[in-house]
Amino acid sequence: MDLSVTLKGQTRDLVLKNPVLTASGTFGYGLEFVTYGDLSELGGIVVKGLSLHPREGNSSPRIIETTAGMLNAVGLQNDGVESFCLEKLPRLPWHKTSIIANIYAASVDEFAELAARLDQEEGVAALEVNVSCPNVKAGGALFGQDPALASSVTSAVRRAAPHKHIMVKLSPNVTDIALMARSVEDAGADSISCINTLLGMAVDIQTRRPSLANVVGGLSGPAIKPVALRCVWQVARAVKIPVVGLGGILTAEDALEFMLVGAKAVQVGTGNFMRPDCAFALTQTLPAVCERLGIDNLTSFCGSLQLDS
Amino acid sequence: MVSFLLTVRLLCAYNKPMSQPNSCELEVLDLVPFGQTGNESRFFALRLGRPNWNIWCPGQFVMLRPHNFGLDIPWARPLAICHMTARHMICFFQVRGKGTRRMAELRPGDKVRVWGPLGNGFVMEPDTPTLLLAGGMGIVPFVGYVSEHLKPWNVSMLFGHREHISCYPVDSINEHIPVDSLREPENGDLDNFIYTIQERMREYAEQKGLVLACGPSPFLRTVQTFAAELGVRCQISLETRMACGVGACLGCVTKTTTAWPVGEKRERHVQVCTHGPVFWASQVAL
Ligand SMILES: Cc1cc2nc3c(=O)[nH]c(=O)nc-3n(C[C@H](O)[C@H](O)[C@H](O)COP(=O)(O)OP(=O)(O)OC[C@H]3O[C@@H](n4cnc5c(N)ncnc54)[C@H](O)[C@@H]3O)c2cc1C
Ligand SMILES: Cc1cc2nc3c(=O)[nH]c(=O)nc-3n(C[C@H](O)[C@H](O)[C@H](O)COP(=O)(O)O)c2cc1C
Ligand code: FES
């Protein structure tokens, strides 16, 4: 069965050997997982969120387990874009699988600078723009919660990285995710990935303290799957560009649920923590699960949800 | 003798863990409760089938996720490798919360997802006088340490614990080296224990020996302070909350000191699961 998919963008296409990617922040730089599977078998690897300069992240505790999920407030600790390009990227099998650089910045200009730097890297197939972060230079509103801001980031990145496929990653913490999707599409995004984490909180009634040093954090894992599925469905109906679905995916069956509602590809996130070979196992079992369900063409299966009975 | 040495070398690659960690599914062979009978047991030796890796170092650990965690307990739990034989791997745990409570319900034949061996183990210098300091469950990695050590007569142990001594795997250490154990009083008058730690560490400082410690954070902090004062080489094994065990989630980080590792990397967050769990006491700020 041919599992390859092409995410047809407005400017650049992204060809994936199969629809299974790993989600940013849950798979390190990929190198952490080389002993658990063959990286080149994956459709792609979205690396840990990169910023212009190294970041130390938040203080501990940064993560807490919740029922069927987890909260994180890592605070985007990373070694910075230079270290990624010089030390990590050359060690990744970028000629055999798509390496997608997830980027994070505190202003539109910084986003553009990052994008321009990564545009020079042959090994980077696409940029994934994380708009779930505050616009520090302009009042601190989240880029991803304001259609005008999301749109200006998207067009700035589009201009700065003309050779790359631009995927914009949407936050579910908005009133109308379809509206956000349409504004980044209009601004030139090639594809959309959703969802990022849901804002959540955990407390300890014994110590009367928040469980995370940062008080609030992002919820991920199986607990968020129904919300993610709903978001992907709404976004896929709202835009023409391809959608990549994620949120609580552990198995091939989960992945197919996202494809049924319109996703062309998926990402595995928290599942990589539950077992380090999760994404590899999912990729390997996908053909057999498709066969069992009588799916002989993934492209025509995508978005084939029947609404009238 | 040569073949004996070879086996030991194979099992413990000294300070260079060389086995490639991987993930496999192991069967529970048995779960043996420790401690007095009567009330519900909280201490268990978990014997699992042998994983498909064979080089490991005492102090390394595994992430363990039994099938009975279902979807509601998403994270695996980090446990030290207690002992390894040709046929099985043994972990030893204390019931603390929901995950270990679920682990206490395991039955022979149940399946457990295990990935490892993870992290860096303790240094092993057969000819250096070595003091092992264990607090509570911190005794677990030392079971493997003393059985892998080539010259156990150079090793001694001080063990501080809260529960009855029969709750801990002390016998398997006693087989190789004498254990000096001190039961901490419930109400926290730790002065005597702390004084004993300091005196023993002083002895090893004078002999240019090595001190290795594993246990709860306040205990490690005490050991770290004495190590700095006495100038004795000392390693400590840290326990932090872990989701992945492989360096990806960045949840388990600890802060390094100004002394480590180098240049602009000083006072940085590093993952305990991959850079540790064993650190030189001077490398980390607790
Ligand atoms: C490298 C390493 C080796 C360890 N080896 C052993 C061992 O051999 N035997 C043993 O009994 N215990 C060991 N521990 C501690 C053990 O992992 C915790 O007791 C266990 O995770 C508690 O899980 P729980 O669900 O019962 O507790 P809960 O409090 O319900 O757990 C909630 C979350 O916090 C985490 N957590 C709670 N306490 C600790 C702790 N002390 N350290 C790290 N994470 C914690 C859990 O993993 C879980 O993610 C080790 C910890 C580490 C980091
Ligand atoms: C520990 C952790 C770190 C994350 N870091 C990033 C990040 O750097 N950039 C980003 O866009 N998303 C990040 N995410 C969000 C995930 O990529 C993903 O969108 C989210 O977890 C939902 O998917 P899941 O339920 O499969 O994990 C992170 C998630 C987790 C749990
Ligand atoms: S446990 Fe995930 S980085 Fe250490």
Image (cartoon, grey):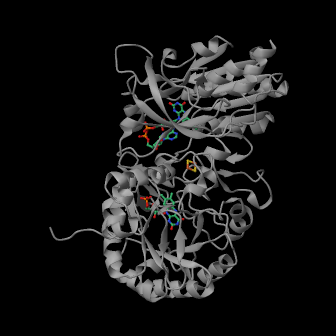
Task: Answer with the quarter of the image where residue B258 lies.
Answer: bottom right
Question: Is residue B204 found left or right of A101 in the rendered image?
Answer: right
Q: Residue at x 75, y 15 (%)?
A: B4
Q: Residue at x 58, y 76 (%)?
A: A105
Asked if A119 appears above or below B265 in the picture, the reply is: below
- Would residue B17 be seen by someone viewing this image from the given angle? yes
| Quadrant assignment for the C terminus of chain A | bottom left
Give percent across and percent down for residue B190.
Answer: 58, 28
Give percent across and percent down for residue A306.
Answer: 22, 68
A143, B221: nearer the viewer: A143
Q: Residue at x 67, y 24 (%)?
A: B145
A16, B99: nearer the viewer: A16
Task: Answer with the quarter of the image where residue A95 lies.
Answer: bottom right
- Would residue B151 be seen by someone viewing this image from the given angle? no
Asked if A6 appears above or below B278 in the picture, the reply is: below
B86, A134: nearer the viewer: B86
Give percent across and percent down for residue A100.
Answer: 58, 68
A294, A42: nearer the viewer: A294
| Quadrant assignment for the N terminus of chain A | bottom left
Question: Is residue A215 found left or right of A236 in the rendered image?
Answer: right
Give percent across and percent down for residue A224.
Answer: 35, 59
Asked if B53 appears above or below B261 in the picture, the reply is: above
Asked if A46 appears above or below B51 in the picture, the reply is: below
